[in-house]
Image (cartoon, grey):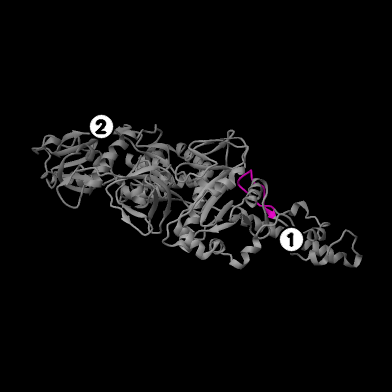
Amino acid sequence: MKVLLPEGAELKGFERELQVALEKANLAGYALMGFTFREALSARLHEIDALIVMEPGVFVCLEAKGYGGKWTGNANEKWFCDGVEIKAVGTNPYKQAENYSYIIKSKLQYRVFKEIEFWVNYLVVAPDSAKIEIKDAAIDRFQPGRSVPICHLSQIEQVLGSIKTREHVAAKVGELGLLGIISELTDIPGERLESLIRNNRLPQEDLSEVSSFVIPEEISLHTVDDDPTKSDRVPSNPHKNSSFKESKISSKPPRKSKSISVAVALLGVGIIGTCVGLAYRLWNSPLCTVATEVRVQGACYKDITRTPLVIGILTPPDQYSQLAAYLKQQLGSQAFNVVIEGGSEVTYQIAQDNIAKGNWDIFFALSPMNGMRAKDNGYRWIAQMFPNFPSTYQSALFVKSDSSIQSIEDITTSTTVALGDFSSASSFYIPAYDLYGKSMTVTAGNRSSEIKELVASKNADVGAAVYGTVKDDPRFRIIHVSREIPGSGVYLSPKLPPDIQQKVEKALTDAPQTIKDKANYGVGNEPSYEILRSISLRSDEVLSCADFSKNPVQFFCSKTPQGIVGKISGFTNESNGTTRLRLEQEDGKTCNILISLQVLSRVPGGTSPGILNRKRVSVTRAAPKQLVGGICEIKVSNPNQLEVL
């Protein structure tokens, strides 16, 4: 295998060991090491340890981690080596390599393969001294879509050689050639690529010509690498193409008449060396995928010195203005600004969309449904909302005081029931659960005040609301009270750097009581959402089957069709807000699942592409569409159609 490096670069440490192993591998193809790749449709850059491009059409991203010792962890949590965290861009090296594979796949899809279905594989490479105890790891073997792939360095040739491709992919690669594809990936003209093939040593005559010249230690060329196991990359021969080759510096003392020119030359080299060193730092330091992110301990987080800290709310903004000013004062220069987004007019679904996208840094959930979605997306509970009220509450179905309806049993297809927002716990999810199995006339999407007015004016026979808001109203009579519903809380985004998370949490905890009271939060225990989650599953089933555009509405599904079962093995985020999930079915076939982030944010156990990836799922109530190449496409419009098994 031929190894390509950026011009003048040299690898050190475990990356160098990987380079040597790849150079010795009896494989037809190229290994691009230390290159920075731009995304297909943006300016974002990503440095990948090694990208393997092999005949007849095999693509593999390698992430090298030179930690010797016992590796522990799993696919979705941090990894450790003898108790020391294995640094990675993201959660762990597996997630890092996986993410890089999606970036390369997206670029190849856009530049080369177009409609042709193909895949970019990935491996984490470990030293032979590593004892792998990562859960579900496929060690020293290629096992696509089934486990966490980890390969010991000595087995890299065997594992790479076992990876196969598809005939239509091989045909396209044969048409363009490997160098043509590499040129598309790196934006380097094909005629220059061969010159990048790495030689193990410099020609002897070049070494002799510069043997008497030593770069002073203070201007040695270095780069910064977040992985402590990887040594700095430096130019393999900084002077190979410099003026020193022609002037042939020798060890003899120069004549006095030339001393000034030599001194100037040395000063020039010092300046050049410093500049080149800076350039290598900028070139080789891994960049975050978003311009407004900052790297902290090998992972990328939101940089609030460049973009505002956002408080997301669903109540009047003036309740949080003092809190925003207080947080800005507490964070000082560490925060560019603190702003408030949202308000009373924002629906729960819009709020949940912002959580799924990570737009809000501090989230005042207001509803337990929103809190549950925040937890699903990695947000962390830090305070209780409405601490002066009970930690749980109940939903109620109510009628006008003179209504003939006495209980749920009296509700028929002609009964008009007023429900709330489709994402509300008290006015939709809980009532939908309690009304399961019934058929009725429904008006949905109403606010709490509107529901009460509809019942009071007899434009609706039954309404759903928080029990405490209607129990003492003489206009109404309660016909059903639900089980206890957990309260809501304040949540902190996982996208904030760990030190900022700690400072924000402390600032919120230590805030003056007047600010806490106005923002409706305080100390409290985090509730369990498990019962609410099981209720929401049944309600989502109603949503998937019911047609709310016409009455009466059936709050049940007539039948449960056989689902399509498989494992999610990758995803692509489209520009229109849709995510394309790759589903590897148990019969070996492949389907693309098209689902909006809005819908995905409500899938229990899989509220974002990263969380859902590599999980086994079932897709129901969807008709697959057959595409060219034996691939099928499934459009999912309701969260209940996608179940994590």
Q: Are discs 1 and 2 less than 8 Å apart at CB?
A: no
Residue 230 in magenta stretch: yes
Residue 366 in magenta stretch: no
Give the quadrant of the C terminus: top left
Question: Crowding at label 1, few (<14), some or many (≥20) Cα neighbours within 10 Å?
Answer: few
Prevalent SS, magenta region: loop
Image quarter for residue 530? top left
Vertical relation: 443 (above or below) 9: above
Question: Which residues lie in the magenta part?
Answer: 222-234
Distance, label 1 to label 2, CA atoms, is 74 Å
Q: What residue did someone put label 1 on?
A: 271
Tag count in the figure? 2
Residue 554 placement, left or right of 80? left
What's the residue type where badge 1 is placed?
Ile
Give the quadrant of the N terminus: bottom right
Residue 544 vs residue 373, the one in the foreground: 544
* Residue 301 seen: no
Residue 123 vs residue 85, the one in the foreground: 123
Residue 106 rendering spot, x and y as whole percentages: 47, 57
What's the residue type where badge 2 is placed?
Arg
Residue shown at 44% from the left, 38% from the top? 512
For label 1, the SS is helix
Vertical relation: 77 (above or below) 176: above
Residue 302 rendering spot, x and y as whole percentages: 50, 49
Q: What residue did someone put label 2 on?
A: 483
